[in-house]
Amino acid sequence: MRLVRRLCVVLATLALLGGCGGGGDDGDGEAATPPLTTVVATTAPTTIGIATSGQCADQNFTPNSEDIASDVVATGLSCAEAEAFVRQAGPLVGATGGPANIEVGGFACVRTKDDDGQRGLPSSDYECTNGDRKVTFHRT
């Protein structure tokens, strides 16, 4: 019985059980262990500025126009870094007519989609990678 009670104490300590009951003598000649209360500390998630896959802010290249990069997604870098990169790369690739492949700031960018604007604004989608870091965006 003593072994069972010790096992119960260990499990309760590991937060696998809420407690083991308690009080009184269980007949083995030893005083019973008092009931256990398990407290599990929780904290709110901490943001450290690195997006594993996050949606970042649109980047405007010409005020009051559709000359923007939207749907900016960062993987393996912060949104601030991705947005700075897009401000650098966006004007070089343009919405249409720009290069299909370009290297900018250590990233290799590839145009993954091109829309000539027959049904709306001309636009292109780009995927830029640098090792395990990736930035994708839609350029109009």
Image (cartoon, rainbow, N blue to C red):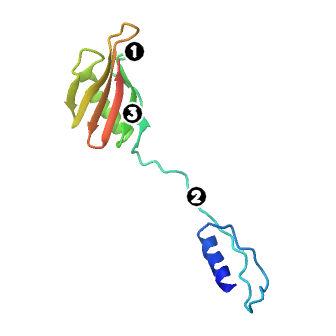
Q: Amino acid at mark 3?
A: Val
- Looking at marks 1 and 3 on the same chain, the residue that comes earlier in the sequence is marked by 1
Q: CA distance from mark 1 to mark 3?
A: 23 Å
Quadrant housing residue 74: top left
The residue sitting at 48% across, 51% down in the picture is 46
Instruction: Give the x, y percent position of residue 124.
Output: 32, 20
Looking at the rendered structure, the secondary structure element under dot 2 is loop
Write down the residue under mark 2: 42
Nearest-to-viewer mark from 2 and 1 = 2
Q: Closest to the observer: 124 or 59?
A: 124
The residue sitting at 40% across, 8% down in the picture is 119
Instruction: Give the x, y percent position of residue 3.
Output: 64, 83
* Residue 117, above or below 112: above
Split into 4 quadrants, where in the image is the C terminus? top left
Split into 4 quadrants, where in the image is the N terminus? bottom right
Q: CA distance from mark 2 to mark 1?
A: 45 Å
Q: Amino acid at mark 2?
A: Thr
Q: Amino acid at mark 1?
A: Asn
Write down the residue under mark 1: 64
Quadrant housing residue 96: top left
* Residue 89, above or below 74: above
- How packed mark 2 is, by other alpha carbons closer than 10 Å (few <14, some 14-19, many 20 or more), is few
Write down the residue under mark 3: 73
Relative horizontal placement of residue 71, taking residue 22 as reference (left or right): left
The reply to whether dot 1 and dot 3 touch (C-beta < 8 Å) is no
Q: Closest to the observer: 61 or 8?
A: 8
- How packed mark 1 is, by other alpha carbons closer than 10 Å (few <14, some 14-19, many 20 or more), is few
